[in-house]
């Protein structure tokens, strides 16, 4: 499994992914699931991947090949909008699935899903989730985050605490709590966590931080959050008994 | 969907279930998923149900019929241990599945799962989870809770805060936070919540409380927990930026 999280805020985008890739419990690798395309001054694009690793690597490779190629329809640097970029990536996914899924079926599931996020000059920053079918939905103020992979354990803290006017830095903190909840409950999600904080209109993907499992900041955050939660629970009234 | 939770503590058992039954989004009912059998002085038995409603009702009906019947092998009041009670309920499930699943297949999934918990004099209190296959596992000190149905959203708070020496009342509080997290994230789980607090060696199931969605205690708990969590987050350091 995998856990990738995208958050769209008034002030920018927060994108984070874990690094665990596994087939069963004994074929385990660390892979990077956050790919950034920022070699043009008018745009910053990030792609986060979940699902079959052969499929996701093929799709990301096609994005890279498209950039070097001459066909405008396959080059994310020539796409006019983030909608068009997402449609392109969804199209690549359909090509890979069309080619591979029949062959893979006997051994497992070839499907994959993606988050595509970023900004192209002339538009505001945007966040999309591509389903396994290659179609996609856009995040909005009312639903400011999207998740792919192992999504459930990490959702309650975001449902409770995240709003679209939350700051980028606080959303980064909430994202790490969300990843911690997921890692505690599910063996198939694991550090390091790659995290991009993109400031709206900056057209810079410079703020990428990788948090290892024993990162001093993250360790302190985990301890303080757990202690604070236990202290909070101790202040709450217990439920009434019958009669 | 459904969410049922069983917690085994040094001091007793905490059992809770939601009340939503649905087929799709427009055929929605409220049902009771916590059945208690305590008409004998030497035992208290609770059965919590998740899955296909026809299957779970049939299994619980068979438990009731077994009690009235003459066959020791089908009467939970004559079973020597909680292990034997659970084996009996698992056997009833296999009978129902054997009879119904082929007919149901064209329309959906006949499967179901159960938590069986309680105490029979001569044994300590015990908690079991019956899988759809009718086999089952027992909870232990190291894994003091079991969940069936929509289990993931409500798991992180239990993983963080619950220990086998937690008190019954505090575990009741944690259970309500766990249900609240699940209800916020999933439409198919809904109040009222039925909750039994069973004190070890009491052989009494008198302490059953039903929490409606607008229950004053639960409303206050939700508000205080959310406020406390936001206040805690405001005290935590934000993650370092790159460079």
Image (cartoon, coloured by chain):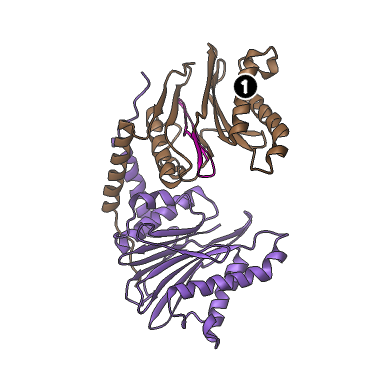
Chain colours: A purple, B brown
Please state the horizontal and vertical placement of residue A29, each as a whole percent of the image. Answer: 58, 63
Please report the residue visible at 58 percent of the width from the left and 33 percent of the height from the top: B53
SS of the residue under disc 1: helix
Q: Which residue is drawn at 47% across and 40% down?
A: B189
Q: Give the range drawn in magenta.
A: B1-29
Q: Does the magenta stretch include residue B12?
A: yes
Residue appearing at x 64%, y 55% in the figure: A24
How many marks are shown on the rendered structure?
A: 1
Mark 1 = which residue?
A: B63
Q: Quadrant of residue A108?
A: bottom right
- The answer, for residue A58, to whether it is visible in the render is yes
For image coordinates 56% across by 66% down, the residue present is: A134
Q: Image height check: is B174 above or below B200?
A: below
Residue A71 lies in quadrant: bottom right
Please identify the quarter of the rendering in which residue B76 is found. Answer: top right
Question: Which secondary structure dominates the residues rendered in magenta?
Answer: strand
Q: Residue farthest to the front?
A: B26
Question: Image height check: is B22 above or below A216?
Answer: above
Give yes or no for residue A42 being in the magenta stretch: no
- Measured as percent of width and height from the top left, residue B4 is found at 50, 35
Nearer-the-camera pick, B182 or A90: A90
Q: Position of residue B30 (x, y in %)?
A: 48, 32
Residue neighbourhood size for the residue with mark 1, other residues' Cα within 10 Å, grouped as few (<14), some (14–19), many (≥20): many
């Amino acid at each position: 499994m995998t856990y990738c999280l995208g958050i769209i805020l008034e002030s920018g985008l927060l994108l984070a992914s874990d690094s665990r890739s596994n087939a069963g419990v004994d074929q385990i690798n660390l892979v990077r699931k956050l790919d950034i395309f920022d070699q043009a001054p008018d745009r910053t694009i990030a792609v986060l991947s979940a699902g079959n690793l052969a499929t996701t690597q093929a799709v990301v490779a096609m994005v890279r090949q498209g950039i070097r190629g001459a066909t405008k329809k396959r080059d994310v640097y020539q796409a006019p909008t983030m909608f068009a970029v997402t449609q392109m990536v969804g199209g690549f996914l359909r090509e890979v699935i069309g080619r591979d899924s029949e062959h893979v079926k006997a051994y497992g599931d070839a499907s994959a899903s993606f988050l595509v996020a970023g900004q192209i000059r002339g538009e505001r920053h945007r966040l999309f989730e591509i389903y396994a079918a290659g179609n996609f939905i856009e995040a909005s103020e009312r639903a400011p985050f999207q998740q792919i992979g192992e999504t459930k354990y990490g959702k309650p803290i975001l449902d409770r605490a995240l709003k679209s006017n939350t700051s980028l830095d606080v959303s980064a903190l909430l994202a790490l709590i969300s990843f911690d909840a997921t890692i505690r409950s599910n063996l198939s999600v694991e550090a390091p966590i790659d995290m991009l904080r993109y400031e709206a209109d900056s057209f810079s993907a410079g703020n990428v931080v990788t948090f290892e499992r024993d990162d001093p900041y993250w360790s302190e955050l985990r301890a303080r959050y757990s202690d604070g939660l236990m202290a909070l629970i101790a202040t709450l009234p217990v439920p009434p008994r019958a009669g």
